[in-house]
Amino acid sequence: MKTAVNRLRGIERDIVQAPQPGDAVPYYEPQSNEIAVFEAAYKKRLPVMLKGPTGCGKTRFLEYMAFQLKRPLVTVSCHEDLTSSDLVGRFLLEGAETVWQDGPLTRAVKVGAICYLDEIVEARTDSTVVIHSLTDHRRKLTIEKKGQEIEAHEDFMLVISYNPGYQTVLKDLKPSTKQRFIAIHFDFPAEDIERKIVINEAPGIGPETAYQLVAAGRKARLLKDHGLEEASSTRALVYAANMINAGLDPVAACQVAMVNPITDDEELAEALMEVVQAHFGA
Amino acid sequence: MADTSKEQAIGELLLQLSDASPVACREVEQVLPVIRPHGAEVTFAWVMACRTLLDYDREAGRAFIRGSREAEKVSEIVLQWTEQALQFALWRNTRRALEGFMANLPRAYGSLGHAGQRRWAEIGFLWCERQVESGCAYFTTPVVDLSGRQGITGIEQVTQPAEELFETRKLLLATYLAGAIRVRNLLGPRAILPWATRGADIMQTARARGEAYFRLESEESLALLLEQLPGFRLAERNRLLSMLLDVWYGHGFELKESSWSPEKGRPFVETDGRGMYFPAVMPGRDEAVLSALHAAGHMRFGTFDRLAMKELFGEAGVDFPEPGPVSWAPLYARYSDDALRFQLIFDLCEDLRVDCRIQQLVPNYLQRLLAAARSGARHPETGVYYGLAVRSIEQSLAAARNGGVRDDRFAPLLRSAATVADAWRIAAAIYSKDDLPRVSDLEAFHAAYLPGRGPNVTRLVHPQQRQDQRQQTQSGAEGEREPQEQGEEESEAPQNAENGDQQDGGKQQEITGISESSDASAQAAGRSGERRQTDAGGEKGVPYPEWDYRESRYKRNWSWVQEKKLAESNITETHRLMNQYAMALKRLKKAIQAQKPTRLAPRLRQLDGEDMDLNAVVSYVVEKQAGRSPKPAIYRRREMRQREIAVTLLADMSTSIMQHLPEGGGRLVDRVRAGVLLFAESMEEVGDAYSIAGFCSKYRDHVSYYAIKDFDEPLSHEVRSQIGGMSGRLATRMGAAIRHATAGFEDIESRRRLLLILSDGRPEDYDDGGDRRYLHEDTRMAVKEAVAKGVHPFCITVDTMANQYLPQIFGRGHYLVLDHINSLPNKLPEIYFRLRR
C-alpha cells in the first residue's frame, strides 16, 4: 500500500529499503535452477555473479530474491567514471566541519543488504578492487580514507552482473575477480515461459498476440550474428505488448519497441521488420 | 481526254515492260485492278514507278509491285507511298531498304496514320542519305519494334539519340538500332542516350568492341544496363536476403549471381541443391524475398534429396546417374515437344509441396505469396496454369484451417511426409488427364510461374544426403569439402592453398618481395631508409617456436619470420579507394569526433597542470579539514593521456584474398585494401597508436611479415600507397605471424594492446600435410601466448565457415564473422571502436 502511494507521488526514498509485509511480490518466472542456486549461495553468503544479455531478467530476478529473502536491495549502476569513493563514501563539508558520508556499498555492508553492482565491467578497474576483500572469507570493507575496516553484516551479500560479449574484450573482468563469485548464467527464457512473462507483464494482451510476439522476438534474436549488438530482449517484448495494449497496431508496436531501439542499420531493421510482418501477417 | 492519253501511255509502258520482263509485267497486271480505281493519272504514276524501280533494280521493283496491293488496301491512297518508294532509286544499293519499306508499309499506315507514316519515311530517307546501310537497318526493322507501341513518338525516341550521336561522334544507325530498341524496351527511352554515348566512345577507340557493345554482347554494355535496370539488386541487398534466410532457416546459404541478363526474359532465382543463383536484378523486393525463401525451401525440404530423386527417376524409368551432378533433362525427354507443359505441371506440384512446408517455418508465407500472386499479371496463353497455382494455394490454406481439401488431386502434397517423387506422380496423373493447354512460347512459359516461383530444373543439381544437411548446420564442413564436381559455371574458389594461375602470380610477387631488386621497387621509390629486416635477425629471419599438438610440445625455432617492406605500392588504387569511400570516411570521422570529448577528457587529479580540478580541490580541502593529509593532486591537465591503447592490424595476405567475389563487384582484396585504408585514416583521427602489417607464408621457414606501418611511423604517402598495393600470395601460417606481431608490442607502453587479425580463411600452409588441426592448434597456442603477454588478439573474418574453427582458436567472443564482405571497409574501424570502448 505504502509503495503504491509512494509511486503515485514520486516520493523520495532511501536506497536501503527492506521489503515490507504489504508489498507486492515482484513477478518472476524461474527459468531453471537459479532460485535454488541463489538460495544456497545466500545461505553460505557467497558472492554471486549474474551473467547474461541485457533485458533477460537479471535485475528482476534479484528483486525477487531480495524480496523472498526479506533483504533490502541496493543497486549501483556502474559507469566508466565510477570511482571507489562513489562506492565506499567520501568526506563532505558541513559548515566548518567535515562529515563522512557512506557510499552505497558501505551502507549495504553495514545494514546487511544485498548490494548489486550492475554492469561491473564498466567501472574502473581500481574501483572493482575494493570489493575483493568483501568477496572472500574476510568479508571486510576497507575504508582507506578513514583508515577503517568494516566487518560486513552477517546478512550482507554482494551480487554483480556482467554481460559477456565481444564488445567487452578489452574490458573483461580480471580472472582473479571472476573466480571469487558463484556464477549464474541467464539467457532469454524458453518460449512458453517468455509467453507467460509477456502475458503477465502486459495484462490484457491476447494469447494469440502474445504467441506471435514471442515467436517474432525469438526469430529476431537469430540476427544477433549479423551486427546486432543486443538482441530484442524479453523486456522489449513486454514493451511491445504494452504498446499494443495501449492501442497501437502490433506491427508498429514491434517496430518502435523491438526494432528501432536496437539498431540504426537500415538493412538490419528491414530484416527485423520482415520477421515481425511475417508473424503478424501484414 | 487527258485520261485516254494517260491510258494510252499506261498501255505503252506495259508493253515496254513486257518486252523487258514478261514476269514483272504479269505481276503489274495482277495489281493494276487495285490501282485503277484511283484514276488514270495515279495509275500512270504508279506504273511509271514500277518501271523506274525495275530499271533501278529488278528485285527492288518486284518487291514494290508485290507490296503495292497490301499498301493500297491499308492506306487507301497510292501516290504518297509511290513517290516515297521512288526516292530509293536516288541512292545505290537500296534494294533491301525498299523491300523493308514495302513490307512495313501496311503496318506503318495502320499504326502510325498517314502523317505518322510520312514522318517514319522521312526519318528513314534521312538515314539513307547519310548511309544506305543505316537506312536499310531502319526500314527492315518492323515498325512495331521501332515504335514500341508508342506511335511515331516511339520511333523518334529511338532515332533522336542517333541523330545527336551521328553529329557528334559519327555513330551510325545501323550499328545502334537493334540494341537501342532493346534498351528502350527494358529501361525506357531515357536510358538510350547515356547507353549509346558510352557505346559511341568505345566505338571510336575499338571498333569490334564497340560493335559487341551495341549488340549488347559485351560485359560493359550489360553491366551498364543492369546498373540502370530498376528493381531489387542482389549485389546491394544480398545482406538482407542472407539475414532473412538465416532467420528462417537457421543457417546461411550460398548466394551467387546467375548469368541472367535482361534480354533472357523474366528473372528467376535458381538453385542447384547446393547454392542459390540470383539474377542481378529482380523486379521487386517482395518477389525477391519470396524467391529466396522458396529456393531455400527446395533445398531444405528435399527437392534435391538423393533418395527421393532416385525414387523419382525410377518412377520415370530413367537411370539415376551416380555419382556427380544430375541433369533433369532425360526426365523430360519422353514428353518431347510437350515438355514445357509437363514441366509446368510438375513445378506446380513440387512448388506447392515445398511452399506448404515453408509455411510451417515462415508464418504467413502462403498468404504473402498469394497476395503477390493475385496482383501479378497473367499471360493469355498460360493464365490457366497461373490460376491453377493460385487456386491450389488458396485450397491448401483453407485445408489448413478446416482440415479438408476440396481438390483432392493436391491433397497428398500437403502432408509433411510428401517427397519430390510424390509431386512427380501427381504431376504425371494431372498431365495424363490432358485438360491443360499446350505451351510453346517461352515468354508464356515464364509467365505461368507465380511471383517467387520459377522453373525448378534449369541447372544440374547436386543431390543432397539428408545426413549431410544435418551436419552442415552443426559442424561439418566435411560434407562441403568433398571433391567438387564442376558445376555449370561455378568453380570453387581457392582457399589459401596453391591453385592455378594465382599461385604463379604469388610466386613472382614473392620474389620481388625478397630481392627488392626488380623494377617493382622502383615504384616504391622514396621509401625511407629504414630497413627493419636488417635488425630483425638477418636473412633467415626471426625464429619462433611452434606447437605440435601430436606430441604436446613446442618445436623450438621451428617457424622463421622474415620482416620486410611491401615491395608493391599503388597510389592510384589508394586514391580510387579514397574516392570510393569518401562518404564512409566522412561518416566515420564524424562519429569519432562526436566521441572525442569523452575520449580526450583532461586528466584529472594531477599533481600539476594548467587548470584546477574543482572536484579534487573540494575533496582535498575536505580531507584536510578532517585532519588527514591528502595528496595535493588538485590539477587537471589538457594533455592527451598517455597512450591507452595500442593496436596492430594484421592482415592475412594469402592467395585466397585474390579471389573474385561470388556475387561480382571486384575482388576480396579490394575490400581488404579499403578496410585497411579506412582503418588507418580513422585511427589518425582517434590518435591511438597503431601499426599495420600483413603476412603470408610458404613453408615453416618462409613466413613473410610485411610491416606496412610501424607504431611510431606517421601515415605517410608511402604507407598509403603500400596499402593500395596490398595483394595476396601464398598461404596462411597464422601462429607465427601472431607471435611476431605480439613481439612487436614489446616496446609499447600501453595498458591495452589489441591485435586485430583480418582473415578470410583458416590457418593453412603448404607443409601442414593436410592436417588442418596442426596449424589450428598452433594458432590457438599463439593466441594464448599473446594473452599471457598482455596482448588481446581479436579476429575479424569474412569466411562464413569460420564459426566452425574460430571459437576453438580465439575463444568465444574474441572473433567476429562478417556476414558480408562488402561491409568490411566500413565495419573494420567500427569494430575497433566498439572494442576499445
Image: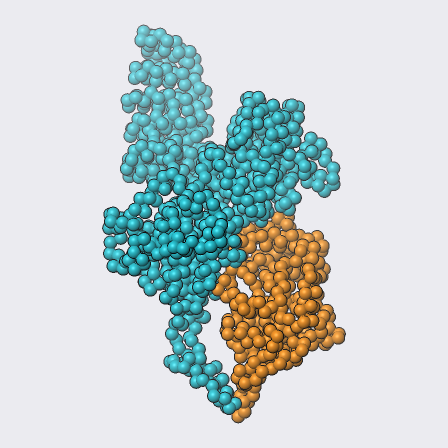
- Comparing B585 with B143, the one in front is B585
* Residue occupying the point 38% across, 17% down: B63
Residue B265, horizontal then vertical, whole percent: 49, 33
The colour with which the image depicts chain A is orange
* Residue occupying the point 37% across, 58% down: B692
- Comparing A110 with B823, the one in front is A110
* Residue occupying the point 43% across, 73% down: B601
- Comparing B202 with A115, the one in front is A115
Q: Is residue B449 left or right of residue B394?
A: left
Quadrant occupied by the N terminus of chain B: top left
Q: Is residue B737 left or right of residue B460?
A: left
Residue A244, horizontal then vertical, whole percent: 66, 58
Farthest-out residue, bottom: A96
Residue A204 visible in the snapshot: yes
* Residue occupying the point 45% across, 39% down: B492
Q: Which chain is cyan?
A: B
Residue B40 lies in quadrant:
top left
Q: Is residue B6 left or right of residue B626?
A: left
